[in-house]
């Protein structure tokens, strides 16, 4: 092997060593597909077991398939999970008692939307597009995006002057538990 | 109970009557970023029909023209959902008595 091949081989080995090891799909891994690709979310059942249990139930029912990203604010978050598509809806399952934690809201954090009542989370969730420390301890953290934030970045934005309401919004094509993925 | 699901059977209790009356209510689009609340006061006859026009006695989450639109939508909804399907027993119990119906739409958000 000549020196050029050796250098290329070493460079490839180094890049492979530095690349984060892909996490194997586990029982808390979710695939969220949009028209632009796949987002991988790791649910935090350690932080919010009741919320995660409800999310898994809804995901396995296909509840989220086709739902809109109805409220998206650039630099803040993309919100979805409402069958009514306007922020007022939820599922037939009951609202979930708050499971606030010390986990911060950073870019990629997945949180549960709620009304003024802390115990009103149901099905709507949001993915942070940037840090949102003003949400810390006020909303339930349910997961984190581990892959595919570039896909979330492409979700159609709404107008800040209209509280992020999106005209002709993008949708969740399919949301499924990774272990059952096809 | 989701507002849109109108019970199929005649209401025999107030708890069954309220969702039947609320089933036609849909706040106007854009009515309040955080959601809205409205209370209407009215009376029903034994057959579930309205005695005179309901009065809007409380609103929250809206002001000015938004409040007027919400009030109009609420009054229209009550007209659409009456006469309410109620049993004779319930009709006898509530006829002519004031009813205060509180309708709440909450938006979920961060």
Image: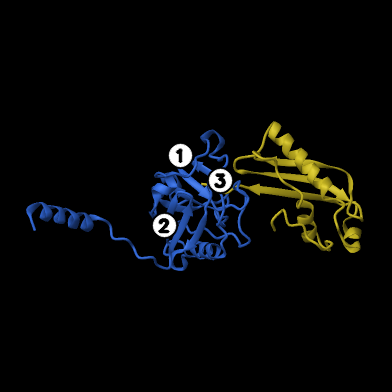
Chain colours: A blue, B yellow
Q: Is residue A125 left or right of residue B75?
A: left
Question: How dense is the environment of label 3, judged by Cα within 10 Å: few (below 14), some, or many (20 and up)?
Answer: many
Circle 3 residue = A70
Q: Secondary structure at mark 2?
A: strand
Query: Which disc, if any, is residue A74?
Result: 1
Count residues near mark 1 (Cα–Cα under 10 Å), then give few for <14, some for 14-19, many for 20+: some
Q: Is residue B94 above or below residue B35?
A: below
Q: CA distance from mark 2 to mark 1?
A: 20 Å
In the picture, measured across the screen, residue A99 lies left or right of residue A1, that is: right
> Mark 2 sits on what residue?
A40
Quadrant assignment, res B54: top right
Contact, mark 2 vs mark 1 (Cβ under 8 Å):
no
Counting residues from the N terminus, which is met first, the one under dot 3 or under dot 2? 2
Q: Is residue A57 toward the left or the right of residue A26 in the image? A: right
- Outermost residue toward the front in this view: A1
The chain letter for the residue carrying disc 1 is A
Instruction: Give whichever of discs 2 and 1 has the lower sequence position.
Output: 2
Using the image as rendered, state which of residue A98 and residue A111 is in the foreground: A111
Q: Nearer the viewer, mark 2 or mark 1?
A: 2
Which subunit holds the residue at mark 2?
Answer: A
Observer-nearest of B94 and A145: A145
Tell me the element at label 3. loop
């Amino acid at each position: 092997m000549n020196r050029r091949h050796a250098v290329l081989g070493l460079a490839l080995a180094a890049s492979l060593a530095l690349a984060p090891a892909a996490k194997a799909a586990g029982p808390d891994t979710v695939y969220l597909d949009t028209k632009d690709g796949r987002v991988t979310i790791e649910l935090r059942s350690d932080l919010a077991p009741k919320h995660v249990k409800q999310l898994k139930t809804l995901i396995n029912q296909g509840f989220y398939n086709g739902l809109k990203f109805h409220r998206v604010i650039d630099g803040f978050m993309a919100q979805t999970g409402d069958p009514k598509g306007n922020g007022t809806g939820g599922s037939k399952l009951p609202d979930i008692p708050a499971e606030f934690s010390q986990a911060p809201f950073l870019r990629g954090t997945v949180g549960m939307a709620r009304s003024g009542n802390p115990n009103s989370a149901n099905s709507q969730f949001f993915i942070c597009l940037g840090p949102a420390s003003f949400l810390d301890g006020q909303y339930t953290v349910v997961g984190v995006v581990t892959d595919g934030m570039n896909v979330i970045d492409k979700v159609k934005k709404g107008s800040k002057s209209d509280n992020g309401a999106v005209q002709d919004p993008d949708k969740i094509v399919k949301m499924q538990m990774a272990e059952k993925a096809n | 109970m989701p507002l849109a699901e109108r019970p199929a059977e005649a209401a025999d209790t107030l708890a069954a009557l309220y969702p039947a009356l609320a089933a036609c209510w849909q706040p106007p689009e854009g009515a309040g970023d955080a959601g809205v609340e409205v209370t209407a006061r009215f009376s029903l006859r034994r057959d579930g029909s309205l005695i005179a026009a309901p009065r809007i006695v409380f609103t929250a989450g809206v002001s000015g023209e938004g409040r007027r639109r919400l009030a109009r939508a609420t009054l229209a909804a009550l007209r659409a959902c009456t006469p309410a399907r109620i049993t004779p027993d319930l009709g006898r119990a509530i006829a002519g008595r004031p009813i205060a119906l509180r309708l709440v739409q909450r938006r979920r958000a961060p």
